[in-house]
Image (cartoon, grey):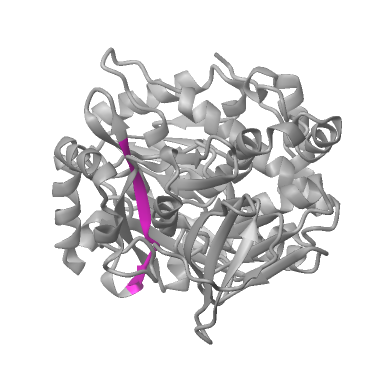
Amino acid sequence: MAKNNKAVQKGPDVILIGAGIMSATLGVLLKELQPDITIEIYERLDSAAAESSDAWNNAGTGHSAFCELNYTPEKEDGTVESAKAVKIAESFEQSKQFWAYLVQNGFLSDAPNFIRSIPHMSFVWGNENVNYLRKRYDALQKNYLFHGMQYSEDRAQLADWMPLVMEDRDPDQPVAATRMEIGTDVNFGALTRAMFRRLYDMPGVRLYFAHEVRDLWRSKSLGGWKIRVENVTTNQVRDVQTQFIFIGAGGGSLRLLEKSDIPESRGFGGFPVSGQWLKCVNPDVISRHQAKVYGKASVGAPPMSVPHLDTRMIEGNQELLFGPYAGFSTKFLKSGSYMDLPKSIQLSNMAPMLMAGMHNIPLTKYLIQQVLQSPEDRLAALREYYPDAKMEDWELEIAGQRVQVIKKDEHEGGVLEFGTEVVSAADGSIAALLGASPGASTAVSIMLDLLKRCFPEQLATETWQQKLKEMIPSYGQVLANNPELGIALRKHTSEVLGLGVYEYTPTEN
């Protein structure tokens, strides 16, 4: 668009768009690595972590691959692929190291407010699924990160682990479960807000709520970038200059990335998936379930819709959720516009989006079925996990929006990705995070990748290298291949984060 002659405000070194867990993580990393750096954060809503990072909106709270079956697909030859699960488990360990550093250094004052221990379990039924889970367990035992996992087909054992799930279940139904005691529940909303409170008090950092970035473009005269930002309360508009922009606006990132017009952004599209929870309102039922129990996704279901009966701590209260139930909306954000999807379609991404749609017809059918579900249909799905569930004990809660990445593909024209992707300019002056799962849980490793792309010179310095190793002791090493270091760090982070004493249990295989 044509730019007018607005006065340009002299800006900071870095602009972060969106006040979610990604921007909070990058902001803290940069201030710790370079204390004199200046940062401005712009958030369109009136509080931090109000979209995907909020506990009620977040489909997963502590993805460590212990229980999420979509990270361990069964291949055509019948073997189970564990590489993605190992990578995610390693990334989550990096996140815990970083959080432990922040707690130890007074950056976060009270770890139990955002992270607690809760067993992670996978539960399946039917002979085929039981065989799969057994093979998954065997595959994961090859890496020490999953040692201590328990596998059982014994109904009495399973009833002890998850009484709601086993009570009044068909006694002839083959069932199996795995259990990982060192699983966690992470309230990313609480964590994000705590990080921003500390950032806000640091010199050189400004945080603007109710400010929406309307446009951005390269600054030819001054170098770097300019953003056009509007105060949505007063409608005042101003332009701000900066040398680096991170677009961490959740589902809103795609439209801003398109406005940047960098070559690397072309061909990317987004497919929004909405969600709903069933929230338990019966305290007696809530108190009887103490775990995150994940099952297998339906055919055609997106990863964010893997069903789970999920214990969470939110605002000091124990909650019990089931879902999420998927849906479709053209909004890219929960508080977004129904025009988000149509406005994101451009000549450069039209073909990939059409081809991705053709290749994902089962997903389309699945979403239509989910949208048309009645309350009785949702209750029937819940009863597969909790046979005695009663309608009056549950109410519907709206979850967050997720925008799955669509990208060009040489062979298929366009593919739908179910992960996260950092898209950055060749010169490293702008980067955006697209996608959803596993998202928040691996925020630290994602931001480390961003630093490598966008701050390569600074990252090569001894100062940054030493500081990163102080914050994340496993930095620069493949933690999955280093049991001695990994076990020691798990013991350390468990103690600092108040997760109890970690005792390493070697596999019996």
> Is residue 307 visible from the viewing direction of this image?
no
Splitting the image into 4 quarters, where does residue 483 fall?
Answer: top right
Magenta residues?
Answer: 393-407
Q: Main secondary structure of the magenta part?
A: strand
Q: x, y percentage for residue 248?
A: 53, 54
User: Residue visible at 57% across and 42% down?
Assistant: 442
Looking at the image, which residue sits at the far bottom?
234
Q: x, y percentage for residue 138?
A: 46, 19
User: Residue visible at 78% across and 33% down?
Assistant: 473
Name the foreground residue: 132 vs 189: 189
Answer left or right for 314 relative to 325: right
Q: Give the quadrant of the C terminus.
A: top right
Name the foreground residue: 287 vs 481: 481
Q: x, y percentage for residue 111?
A: 73, 57
Q: Give the quadrant of the N terminus.
A: bottom left
User: How many numbered discs sit on the rendered protein?
Assistant: 0
Q: Residue 36, relative to residue 175: is it above or below? A: below
User: Residue visible at 44% across and 44% down?
Assistant: 437
Is 403 in the magenta?
A: yes
Is 251 in the magenta?
A: no
Answer left or right for 489 relative to 309: right
> Is residue 40 visible from the viewing direction of this image?
yes
Name the foreground residue: 165 vs 345: 345
Q: x, y percentage for residue 399?
A: 38, 64
Q: Residue 284, relative to residue 158: is it above or below? A: below
Answer left or right for 416 relative to 134: left
